[in-house]
Image (cartoon, helix red, strand yellow):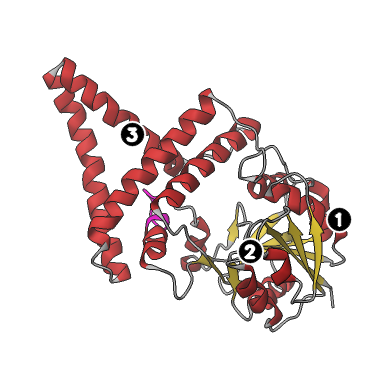
Amino acid sequence: MNSVSIVIPTYNSSSTIEDCLESLVKQTQSPEEIIIVDGHSKDSTIDIAKKFECKILYEEGGSRAAACNVGVPEAKGDYIVFIDADAIAKEDWLENLIVAFDEDHGREVVCTTGPNIEYPNETDFGKAVSAVYNTFIGGNWTEHIKSIFNKENRYVQSAAGCNAAYKRVYLEEVMPFNENLITAEDTEINYKLIQKGYSIYFEPNAIVYHQRPQTHKAYRNKAKKYARGKIQFFRAHNAGLDFGHVLPPLYFITGIFFILALLANYWVGLGIAGYFGFYLLTILLTSLIQSIRYKKWKFLYLLPIMFFEGHICWSLGIIQEIFLPKVQKGNK
């Protein structure tokens, strides 16, 4: 049987790392090793990790990409599996990821991935974040979920960094992870694999529960950060942006023009108002649908606020990265 190494980047992860490691030692398929790559945490992350049989390494770059670049060369496994420190793996997660490689795909599958969904006991705010993410106007950042409803096509363009397994020999072909990117270092690795003609397979039963932002501030910061990462990736590869990514800035800019046009010319402003009104209606209808789906009536007023702030921060991130490019400087 081929061996498996799990790599976990950590930095000040004391509030979540124990639950993550507990879920890994209970897997139906045991990994050969679990590797913690820490960015010199200032909390008790390492003390907690030492309670488990983990190999503990350190990275100096202060980023997830740097942690991956340290962990992979030190790993012994034929398969390299990544999970985040704030994620919990379902008991059969690893088994399902690895077994998926052995299916008759008729193509060279070098990476498998699966859903990352909110914790079973997630807070209402965390569930609201998921409700936003799992919509078209929310960016549909968990686009792999689509594959659950399309059994004929589970081959996807990327794999979430918190839930991905790679055949080591192919991963090493496209390494190192890009430490200059704010985010999207995993997207770039997957893009390079796809460009080589390899395939990424989505296995809907390989589930991890991934913590969502717990405050409005954390939610806004994540939107801004990921928007900048998207633009960095697009600038490097002229790929990675779809309509769902550019829609928020279009609405944001339209809103500004609406206000300016209304001040300058009533009729021009009225015309733009119709377009902007469609945006508002879309948000309200989407919020209603998600409130019903999640059976949370408080979402009726919470989700519109979150759509607005998410779109504004995503737009600001894109605009800032276009005019004021930023290089990843790490966690510290």
Our reading of the magenta stretch's main secondary structure is: loop
Identify the amino acid type marked 1: Pro
Q: How dense is the environment of label 3, judged by Cα within 10 Å: few (below 14), some, or many (20 and up)?
A: many
**Residue 1 higher or lower than 171, as above or below:** below
Q: CA distance from mark 1 to mark 3?
A: 44 Å
Q: Decide which of 129, 110 is in the foreground and name it.
A: 129
The mark lying in front, picked from 1 and 2, is 2
**Disc 1 from disc 2: Cα separation:** 20 Å
Residue 156, numbered label: none
> Was residue 86 drawn as part of the magenta stretch in this picture?
no
Residue shown at the point (59%, 72%) measured from the top left: 88
Can you identify the residue that label 2 sits on? 85
| Residue corresponding to mark 3 | 252
Assess disc 1: are there few (<14), some (14-19) or many (≥20) residues with their C-alpha within 10 Å of its C-alpha.
Answer: few
Q: Which residues are magenta?
A: 132-138
Q: Which residue is at a point 65% across and 60% down the rendered structure image?
A: 43
Q: Is residue 6 left or right of residue 88?
A: right
Which is more N-terminal, label 3 or label 1? 1
The 10 Å Cα crowd at callout 2, few under 14, some 14 to 19, many 20 or more, is many
Q: Is residue 200 visible?
A: yes
CB atoms of marks 3 and 2 within 8 Å: no
Which amino acid type corresponds to the residue marked 3 in the rendered image? Answer: Phe
Quadrant containing the N terminus is: bottom right
Callout 1 secondary element: helix
